[in-house]
Amino acid sequence: MFRILTWIISWGLFFVLVAVPTFAQEFQREANTIPVFIDGMLVHSPFAGAIISPRPTFVDIDGDGDIDLFLGNSGGFITFYRNTGTSANPIFTFESENYAEVDVGFASAPTFSDIDNDGDFDLFVGENDGNINFYRNTGTSANPIFIFESENYAEVDVGFASAPTFSDIDNDGDFDLFVGEDDGNINFYRNTGTSANPIFTFESENFAEVDVSFASAPTFSDIDNDGDFDLLVGGRGFVNFNFYRNNGSSTNHDFSQEIENYISIKFSDLATPTFADIDNDGDLDLFVGEILGNINFFRNTGTATSPTFTLETTSFANINVGGSTPTFADIDNDGDLDLFVGEHTGNINFYRNTGTDTDPTFILESENFASINVGSRNVPTFADIDNDGDLDMFVGHEAGKINFYENTGTPTNPTFPFEANLTGIDVGTNSSPSFTDIDNDGDLDLFVGEDPGNINFYRNTGTASNPIFTLETENFASIVVKALSTPTFTDIDNDGDPDLFIGESIGGLHFYRNVSAPTSVSDPVVEVFPNTFNLSQNYPNPFNPETTIQYQLPKASMVRLVIFNFLGQQVATLVNKEQEGGFYDVQWDGTDDTGRVVASGVYLSRLEAKEFSKVKKLILLR
């Protein structure tokens, strides 16, 4: 069921065989491993990136008793998110970008219904022309096969951007038809026929008075499992994925909007993330600039190792500069973080922190910091690139180069004369720089996002005080987002390596956890044993079929490592014995204590050793 690999070879003279790191970095995309709450509700896949023109529908396509999610999009395809949670607590996990190979050309809007009452779901897809495509299921409920039958079902034509869905809204035993359209409202066609022979009669063009302004895409589902249908409405462009809870009943509806970001975080455009421990509580908080000029603030209400981001305000410090690109730096060396915000005009706004490190107050001191203006949207960042004890400034901009401003002043009185463009660096358009020591060799390496959405990696082949940036790849970790990538590195799980977050042009965020494991030959080296207890994040995560869990013990201890499901029920005991101090690996293969294979879903690993206890979240995808 599992196996333990100990790194401890001998206590004698503290000699052990360990892996000598080569620091080949591996980044794993994770859409839903960091909880994000907006208006008190969990966002299901917050770091999946923005969904372009989402058109949602729900159906239990795999017959496992819970609803799965399908999203139409502007490209004409259908994206499939399988429910790896439960019917009462759904977790929608990305599985496919082109379900059933359906392609209606543009603006697909899928929905499922057993329209012929034969016991399986048929597929209907709205499209840009305003009509509805019908695919009959000639397979079974467990193994559907969708065959195209008509491009003008029921002769419904709403003019432009049709988005159909079916629901027995009046609880009379047959399906009624709802069709979103380009104007943002919802058309209601009541079924005045029967379940086997439907007749759809137009009744209203403004159902529930829902108006999302542009290209509405409705779907109904009992999302909270309370016995009545709730309403979810996607849209096009800046429209998010809106959730309207039914506070009435199955026959007497009362829909009220609860959240605009039900599946993923979506900002207006040009999302630019940055992290800072703004309240000095030992964990990193999240800030995101966007094209509208405001800054969104997500406070970390979790911990340094298990963050949870809760939206606190969409207008941090009441800042609005137009195309905001924020970054924090203690520019005056007074022990608290100051704020710099680039904007679309090319200048940089400077807000000095006149408060404290736990209670900051940001006062606008200059709209043109250091008289810098690059003439267009700019992305500033700071790093002590010459290792002289003060912060230097770098500014990416539309021309694709990076301006370098060496701090020729002091840590408390900085001066930034223009030095030059960084030699040899030109990514074409919209450079977005970020620094981190990716290879752990004591100097800063450079990463540059750009217009197509890839990330350029320049390894520092010089030293900490005399850097030489050498292009190693234009496609770091094979990551590409939907244009205008803005990378930032931070150790979000406090495990000692930099993780990667990326903003994109259409307003979404992506998270890639650094799951690199040291690789090498085995050499005898002197190794200091750990001085603290710790449970690391499993890798890979999500996983299938097995995953590795690492933990460390500073001394001999009675150890229990147990797997629980998300309901708190014990699933498997991996370790339950006395162990010597050292580093340990445990593999879990997704089976319980009886050897049975467990279902896909979210699980928790808990390590207990002496007074120490720690929990990590694992995601099993089968």
Image: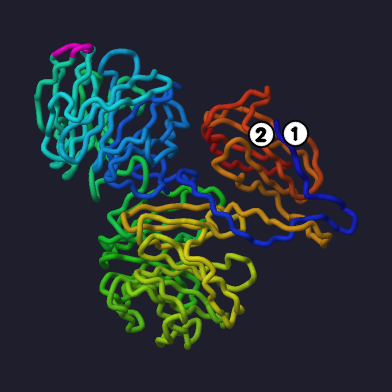
The majority secondary structure of the magenta stretch comes to loop
Taking the view exactly as shown, the residue that stands out farthest to the right is 12
Q: Residue at x 25, y 20 (%)?
A: 249
Asked if the residue under mark 2 is in contact with the one under mark 1, i.e. CB atoms within 8 Å, the reply is yes
Visual colour scheme = rainbow
How far is the residue under mark 1 from the one under mark 2?
Answer: 8 Å
208 vs 461: above or below: above
Q: In the image, is residue 194 part of the stretch drawn in magenta? A: yes
At x 36% / y 55%, what residue is drawn? 482
Q: Is residue 192 visible?
A: yes
Q: Classify mark 2: residues with Cα within 10 Å, few (<14), some (14-19) or many (20+).
A: some
Residue 7 in the image, given as x and y percentages of width and height: 78, 49
Q: Quadrant of residue 371?
A: bottom left
Q: Quadrant of the N terminus?
A: top right
Residue 528 in picture, x, y percent from top left:
78, 59
Query: Residue 360 bears which disc, if any?
Result: none
Magenta stretch: give its range: 193-197
Q: Amino acid at mark 2?
A: Val
Q: Residues within 10 Å of mark 1 (few under 14, many from 20)?
A: few
Name the residue located 55 percent from the left edge and 35 percent from the top edge: 620
Secondary structure under tag 1 reads: strand
Q: In the rendered picture of this protein, how many numbered marks are placed on residues?
A: 2
Q: Which mark is residue 576?
A: 1
- 5 or 458: nearer the eye? 458
- Can residue 285 be seen in this snapshot? no
Q: Which residue is mark 2?
A: 562
Identify the residue at image location x=42%, y=31%.
Answer: 90
Q: Is 384 included in the stretch rendered in magenta? A: no
- Whether residue 146 sits left or right of residue 440 in the image: it is left
Identified by mark 1, the residue type is: Asn
